[in-house]
Image (cartoon, rainbow, N blue to C red):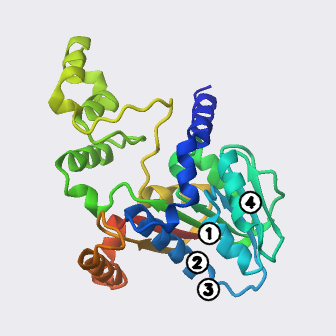
Amino acid sequence: MKNNIEQKEIKRWWEAKRQLRWDNIYKGKNYAALKLNNRMNKILFYFNQLEKKKINILELGFGGGHLAYNLIKKGHTYKGIDVSSNLVRAAKSRCKNLRNRNFSFLCKSIDKKLKFPNNHFDVVIVCGVMQYATKPLFTFKEILRVLKKDSIFICAQSNFIVLRNFFNFRSLINRVYCLFANEEYEVSNSFRSLLLETKLKRNFKQSLKKKIIESKFCNKYFIKVNFKFKKRIIFPKKIISLGKKAGFNVTKIDSSGPFFNIGYKNKLALFVSKVLQSMTNIFFFSFLKKVNNSFIIIFKK
């Protein structure tokens, strides 16, 4: 019952008009554009290392179809699933003039059984989606089922423990507590959310809860959400554990920046971020991958 309510609310979230920003977000010069383009380029880097010329691809959560466009353009067979009918239309529009016609975009939930046969795809890609999955292990097992033997699953996600979030006191406290307490869902960086939307809420009587709600100090950075679901806390160790439980083997762990809240115009900070990114390939500094903006895990069936 809870999963059904969450799935309907996630659908409602993604059907909102504001989510159409995903159609053009990659074209910007801000932090979001830099982050998403870096992550997409890292996925394409690993995808281009595959030896097969014609690859059968499934992508769960394709957004505005930006990654899809690059894959279809190369002549591959592509199937995409997304919960938003608006983004399905945006992706179809983006790819409508491509010469390769071996693609389709479907409006479906990733929480349902995938309507594809066993051992069907060469590659499955999930990018920035697992925080919305109501049954993450089920989704991973379905991905395993539809993948051919020795094929790969690329999972790329924003990182809950990204370095830049540790420079804000409230954000630092939030993340340290959530990791220590093994919280399942994200909350805003306010003390109100930390105290009343996590396991900590069991420690407060109703009278004290009221005082917290009325406190200006506790309400700083509070975000009121009018949807009945919360995003899952996602970081590399959690996704790796999920993959192994589903039956995958991990073949590669990588990351993409920026490390800081910057855009393309922040030249000095961008340079420093690129230096840190290059350092992640050095064994001694590989720990930086764990606190980079996004992480990329490559699994093999």
- Disc 1 and disc 2 in contact, CB within 8 angstroms: yes
Q: Amino acid at mark 4?
A: Lys
- Disc 3 and disc 2 in contact, CB within 8 angstroms: no
- Disc 4 and disc 3 in contact, CB within 8 angstroms: no
CA separation in Å, label 1 and label 3: 16 Å
Residue linked to disc 3: 49
Mark with earlier residue (4, 3): 3
Give the image location of residue 191, x and y in percent.
22, 34
For label 1, the SS is helix
Residue linked to disc 2: 44
Mark 1 or mark 2, whichever is nearer to me: 1
Mark with earlier residue (4, 1): 1
Quadrant housing residue 201:
top left
Instruction: Check disc 1: other Cα within 10 Å, few if <14, some if 14-19, many if 20+.
Output: many
- Disc 1 and disc 3 in contact, CB within 8 angstroms: no
Residue linked to disc 1: 67
Q: Is residue 110 visible?
A: no
Residue linked to disc 4: 92
Mark with earlier residue (1, 3): 3
Q: Amino acid at mark 3?
A: Gln
Instruction: Check disc 4: other Cα within 10 Å, few if <14, some if 14-19, many if 20+.
Output: some
Mark with earlier residue (1, 2): 2
Q: Amino acid at mark 1?
A: Leu
Q: Is residue 257 above or below residue 11?
A: below
Give the image location of residue 64, x and y in percent.
62, 59
Q: Is residue 1 above or below residue 282?
A: above
